[in-house]
């Protein structure tokens, strides 16, 4: 069992109101980014205690850094925040990852509540206790596993979300289907026609699936690596492109490309049939545009996989598919195979 408390839908914000009003809470800090401050905070202000402190960081992956954490730690220290302080992280995966990490480290740990406002953070980032920041160009290089006190998911936040960001979150939903729910994948939802009310059951199912896996392996020594499908190549692409000015890529877009590459690796290794590879590719390309890079860049992108957290020594361990809905972890792949997978993707 995970120790956090999960609220999805109409109960989420009333539950948050109760938590922040708790007898044992000394001060309440709310972490936002420049967008969630404008778009999401108004839904919360009536629920927050008078005198709550607002902390704001700039929006975007490039601010998921130690330097942004320092902003948080400085404010906490200046306001004499003690160990009974509660940090409410109101935002997408950048805010929930960074805020969770900042809270876990401040005075060796204060309680935090995740209030995810993007689809990606609602179905994935706010759940399961992975927190952290990027470092030296590598994704989530610094971080800790720390469960939040609660996760409060209000799908109404999605109303102001950019469609590109919505799609990015959808990639992690599809990832959940591909590793563990063939039936949902085969239902073939068409994202274009979904209204806010349609998202609620999708969020509920995705969160339940992720929690079932995390509960069995919270520290990612085995089974949890399934949740990293698409990320060996996806993180390599994301890290590479983040270093290139003007070539912005969203996490989910990188993961979608990574899933195509890793599905191809699965097929090459005889784990996945050509028909299944084809239906994965067809579906992913019906939602996501192709990530642009030139073939000369494939080696440099692949190099980033050497820093993947699932590796042991020089062995790159990938999560692959042995069928749609059946992920398999700790599958060794070489740097050459990763570069070949990227070349395959590039040719499609
Ligand atoms: N901890 C985990 O298990 C986990 C899982 C998946 C992804 N992640 C991490 O999550 C991050 C990506 O998260 P993300 O996609 O949410 O990105 P994000 O936090 O950068 O949010 C995307 C953009 O949407 C804006 N935004 C957020 N909510 C909004 C709303 N309701 N209305 C309008 N704008 C809004 C943000 O300001 C930002 O500009 C990556 O760093 C990734 O590594 C972590
Ligand atoms: O919760 C997990 O476990 C995941 O791997 C979920 C991923 O979608 C997420 O992007 C996570 O942050 C990746 O973690 P990392 O360990 O590869 O940095
Ligand atoms: Zn991810």
Image (cartoon, rainbow, N blue to C red):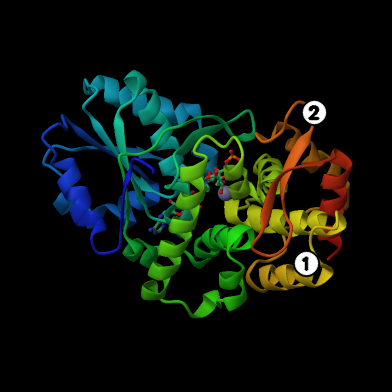
**Which residue in the protein does label 1 denote?**
277
Taking depth in this image into account, of 33 and 204 the one nearest to the observer is 204
Give the numbered dot on residue 134.
Answer: none
Secondary structure beneath dot 1 equals: helix
Specify few, some or many for label 2: CA neighbours under 10 Å numbering under 14, 14-19, or 20 or more. few
**Residue 50 in the image: x percent, y percent?**
11, 41
| Residue drawn where x is 49% and y is 34% of the image | 132
- Residue 61 drawn at (x, y percent): 53, 43
Q: Whole-percent x and y of residue 284?
A: 67, 68
Tell me the residue at 50%/67% (across/down).
Answer: 163
For disc 2, does the CB lie below 8 Å from ligand 2? no
Figure quadrant of the N terminus: top left
**The residue at label 1 has a CB less than 8 Å from ligand 3:** no
| CA gap, disc 1 and disc 2 | 28 Å
Question: Would you place residue 126 above or below residue 256 in this image?
Answer: above
Image point 85% across, 54% down: which residue? 269
Q: Is residue 292 visible?
A: no
Q: Which of the 4 image quadrants contains residue 260? A: bottom right
Image position of 51 (left or right of 8):
left
Which residue has dot 2 on it?
A: 314
Horizontal side of residue 264 vs 22, given as left or right: right
Q: Is residue 12 visible?
A: yes
Name above or below for residue 135 compared with residue 258: above
Of pointers 1 and 2, the one earlier in the residue sequence: 1
Badge 2 element: loop
13 sits to left or right of 325: left
Of residues 327 and 50, the one nearer the viewer is 327
């Amino acid at each position: 069992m995970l120790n956090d408390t999960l609220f999805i839908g109409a109960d989420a914000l009333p539950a948050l109101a109760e938590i922040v009003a708790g007898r044992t809470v000394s001060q309440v800090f709310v972490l936002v980014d420049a967008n969630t401050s404008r778009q999401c905070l108004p839904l919360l202000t009536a629920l927050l205690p008078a005198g709550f402190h607002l902390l704001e960081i700039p929006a975007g992956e490039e601010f998921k850094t130690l330097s942004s954490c320092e902003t948080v730690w400085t404010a906490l220290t200046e306001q004499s925040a003690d160990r009974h302080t509660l940090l409410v992280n109101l935002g997408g995966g950048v805010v929930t990852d960074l805020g969770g990490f900042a809270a876990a480290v401040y005075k060796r740990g204060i309680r935090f509540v995740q209030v995810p406002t993007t689809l990606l953070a609602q179905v994935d980032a706010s759940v399961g206790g992975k927190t952290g920041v990027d470092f030296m160009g590598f994704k989530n290089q610094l971080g800790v596993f720390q469960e939040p006190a609660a996760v409060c998911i209000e799908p109404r936040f999605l109303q102001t979300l950019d469609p590109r960001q919505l799609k990015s979150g959808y990639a992690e939903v599809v990832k959940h289907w591909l590793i563990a729910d063939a039936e949902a994948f085969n239902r073939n939802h068409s994202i274009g026609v979904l209204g806010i009310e349609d998202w609620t059951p999708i969020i509920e199912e995705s969160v339940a699936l992720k929690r079932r896996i995390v509960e069995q392996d919270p520290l990612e020594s085995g089974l949890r690596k399934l949740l990293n499908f698409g990320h060996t190549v996806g993180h390599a692409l994301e890290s590479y492109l983040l270093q290139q000015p003007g070539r912005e890529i969203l996490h989910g877009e990188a993961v979608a490309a990574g899933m195509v590459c890793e599905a191809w690796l699965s097929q090459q290794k005889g784990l996945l049939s050509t028909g299944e590879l084809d239906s994965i590719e067809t579906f992913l390309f019906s939602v996501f545009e192709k990530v642009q890079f030139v073939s000369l860049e494939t080696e440099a992108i692949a190099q980033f996989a050497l820093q993947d957290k699932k590796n042991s020594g020089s062995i790159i361990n990938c999560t692959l598919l042995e069928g749609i809905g059946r992920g398999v972890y700790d599958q060794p792949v070489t740097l050459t195979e990763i570069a070949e997978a990227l070349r395959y993707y590039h040719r499609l």
